[in-house]
Amino acid sequence: MTATPTRTPRALTIAGSDSGGGAGIQADLKAFARCGVHGCVAITAITAQNTLGVSAIHPIPPEIVLAQVRAVVSDIGVDAVKVGMLGDTPTIRAVEQALAELPSGTPVVVDPVMVAESGAQLLDPDAQGELLARILPRASVITPNVPEAHALLRHHGGAQDDGEQTARALLALGPRAAVLTGGHRELAADLFVSASDPELVVEIPGERYPGGAAHGSGCTHSSVLAAQLALGRDPLQAAFVARALAGVAVADGLRDVGEGAGPVDVIGLERLRRAAADEPGEELHEEKSGLKTSTVPEALREAREY
């Protein structure tokens, strides 16, 4: 159990924008908010995408990426950073500089985004070596799924199973800890490993939700993990919370949004809609709707506690 922070915790996402609102910085900000953390952004690329796929990508100039991070850090400050889609070598080098300028000890969670759920390429193939050399060694935790882990380890000459061997091999890439996420594993459990005890692999169990909606699940997982680090949890505690909340977000995913893979729902939109129906102002229509004014504070309290 962590102590309640004396000020608002702050997390920064360095990632791409998803115009469909399901993944990228949009998912990250929702995950931060769900954890009670104020979210800031440094946008690396603008994507034109929906639930069916990515139709266009426009990289943000590297100097603007770096300027965004500097603006946030110099005024607001950050308690943790999540790194997502980087796209190309110039962006990777700008983000490397940004991470080097962070206050010492700032936790950094890296989600090595390479391919969108729709299959679109989100990292230039020739930039993969740059990601390995410049970003992963600066990570407190990396959160690849099995295909991403295999791609990274192929480049590095490492293991190729979907379990403990691959999880341990990820530590050779330089992070202080790694979570091999379970979405592409036979079992849905995540695997946690740490450089402090490389032989120990901790299984983080979780359910599989084939009827859910999973677009943005990786972004949500890594952002919840970063938010938990901002709140003061250690990486293993943060990984357990991330697995739990990402699982709920998939189970509650918005299958009615779009024609393709629906977005996850980490906020709980249905519950919020129910609470919003009882907010102040509805009492003006009390006789027509049958709403009792006494239910208003109860609904608001429920919304605040959720």
Image (tube, rainbow, N blue to C red):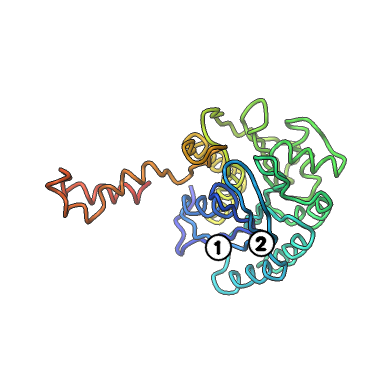
- Residue at disc 1, secondary structure: strand
Picture residue at 36% right of the left edge, 42% below the top: 271
Quadrant in the rendering for residue 137 = bottom right
Q: Residues within 10 Å of mark 1 (few under 14, many from 20)?
A: many
Residue occupying image coordinates x 28% and y 47%: 277
Which percent across, then down, holds residue 229? 58, 53
Identity, as a three-letter code, of the amino acid under mark 2: Gly
Q: How many marks?
A: 2
- Percent coordinates x, y for residue 190 in the rendering: 64, 35
Residue type, label 1 = Cys
Q: Is residue 290 left or right of residue 5?
A: left
Q: Nearer the viewer, residue 189 or 83?
A: 83
Check disc 2: other Cα within 10 Å, few if <14, some if 14-19, many if 20+: few
**Image point 58% across, 41% down: which residue?**
215
Q: Position of residue 6 (x, y in %)?
A: 45, 63
108 and 252: which one is in front? Answer: 252
Q: Is residue 31 left or right of residue 63?
A: left
x and y percent of residue 297 in the render?
A: 23, 51
Identify the disc placed on residue 40.
1
* Residue indicated by mark 2: 105
